[in-house]
Image (cartoon, rainbow, N blue to C red):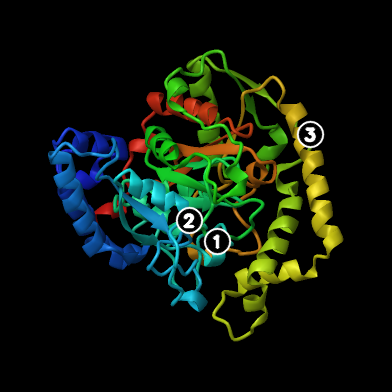
Amino acid sequence: MTQDTTRDPALLSATALAEAIAAQALSPVEAVEALLARIARQEPTLHAFTEVYAADARLAAEGADRAIRSGHAVGPLHGVPVAIKDLVDIAGRITMGGSAAHSARRATRTATVVRRLVAQGMIVLGKTHTVEFAYGGWGTNPHLGVPWNPWDRAVARTPGGSSSGTGVAVAARMAPWGLGTDTGGSVRLPAAFCGLTGLKVTVGRISTHGIVPLSPTLDTPGPMARSVADAALLYGALAGPDPLDPATRGIVPDDPFPTLNRGVRGLRLARMPASEREGVDSAVLAAYDRALDDLARLGAEIAEIRLPFRFADIFALGAICDAEAYLINGALAEDPGAPLGEAVRARILAGARLGAHAYLDAFRQREVLKRSFAEALAGFDAVLTPTTATPAIPLAEVDEALPPSRFCRLANLLDLCALALPSGHSADGLPLSLQIVCRGYDEATALRIGQAYQGATDWHLRLPPAISM
C-alpha cells in the first residue's frame, strides 16, 4: 500500500505537512487533532508512547495557528508536530529513560534539541518508549512494555531499539517524524524494522545536552522520519554548535540541502565483501543486491571494498559502552531489588569487570581501526550494507545475547555517519533496509545518496497494515 494523503492529515509526510501549514491550506490544529485521534485509536495496541501531551499540544497548535494567520510564523516548521524519545529532558516532564526505577524522575531542564525544535514553532506530541537506558537493539523492555511493530498485526515482532517507540509512532502515522538516539544502532535498527529512514549523525553534529547518557563517548541524537527529505529537514533543524555540549564546539555547521538532489552520478560506492553475506537472510541480501543495481543504474560506480576487519568483530565498542554505562548506572544494576531487565543489568554489570587498562586499550584499538578503515575507504564515497541481517523477528525468538547491530556498530565506534532507509519487503511483507555509511561529518553525502535512491523507488511510501488498528 502506498501513501494516501487525501483523507487524513496524519498521512502527510513531514515536508508536505510543513508546506501545507505554511501555505495555510491546513492548520496546525487540524494536524494535531488528526494525530491525536490516531494515537487514541492505535496507542492501546501499539504502545509507542510513555506519555501523550494532548492538552499542551492542542494549546500549542492554537497558538501556532494564530501566529501563522497573523503573519508571525517563526519559520517553515511552525506548527509541525514531533515525537520525542523518553531519554530527552523537557523541564517539568517525566524522563524515565526506559527505566521503571525512574518512573518519578521529573526533569529540571530542557534538552537543547527540544529547545531548538520548539524555538522553530514545532509541537511536541509526547514521549516515546525506549529500551532501558537505551541499552539494547531489539526494542524489548520487560518492565515498561514493548511497542508493537505495526508491520505485523498478528505476531508481536521486534520494533528495533533502543528508539523503539519513536520507530513505531512514526511508522504508524501517529507522528510525522521523531527524535531518537544512536549509540550502537539505536536510530537505524528501529528505522530498519519499522520501514523508516533514520540518520545516525557524527558525534558533535547534534547536541546531547539534556539527554540521559548511555555512553557519552558514543551517544548521538538523530532524526527518524518517513523519507530522506524529511530526515534532512529535521537534521537541519537539530544540528549546530551548542555551548552546553563541548563535543559540538568547533564543528562547522552543515547544510545538506545544496547537494541533496544532485544524484549519484560520479560517486563511487562500496559493496561489502562477499564474506559478510554469511548468516544474512536471503530476502535481505536480495533487497541489498537490488538496491546496488538501482544505484548503478542511476550512475554510481559500485565496487567491492576490502575491509581490514569483519563487521561482527568490532569489540572495542562493547568495552567503551559497558564501562561508561556502568559508571552512570552501575549502582542501580548492583541493586538486586531494582526493577531492571536482566539482559540490560548484565550489560551494565559487564562494565564492572573492566579495569582502566581494558577501557583505555579500547580507545587505542579504536584509533587503529579508524586508520585502517580510512585507508580501505580511500577512493570511495560511501560503504553500502544491509542495516540488519534479518527482517523484524517475533519477540518470542529474541536472544538478548545476540544483538541485531552487526552492521551498525561500525559507524558508532569509528565516529562515522550512516543512513538507514527502506529497500524492500520480505515474503511476509516486513520492511528490509539499506545502510549508507559515510565518513564522519559527511552527512550531506549519505543523504544525497539516499535521496537519489528514494527518487527511483517507492519502498519508503509503503504503509504498514496495522495503521488502521
Q: Mark 1 points at which residue?
A: 134
Q: Of circles 2 and 3, which is in front?
A: 3
Residue 364 in the figure: left or right of residue 419: right
Disc 3 marks a residue whose amino acid type is: Arg
Which quadrant, please, contains the N terminus? top left
Mark number for residue 371? 3
Q: Residue at x 64, y 83 (%)?
A: 335
Q: Name the residue under label 2.
A: 163
Residue closest to the eye, 448 or 102: 102
The spot of residue 292 in percent (x, y) is: 54, 26
Q: In this view, does 173 lie above or below 256?
A: below
Which quadrant, please, contains the C terminus? bottom left
Looking at the image, tell me whether mark 2 or mark 1 is earlier in sequence order. 1
Distance from disc 2 to disc 3, alpha carbons, whole Å, reads 30 Å
The spot of residue 282 in percent (x, y) is: 56, 41
Residue closest to the eye, 80 or 462: 80
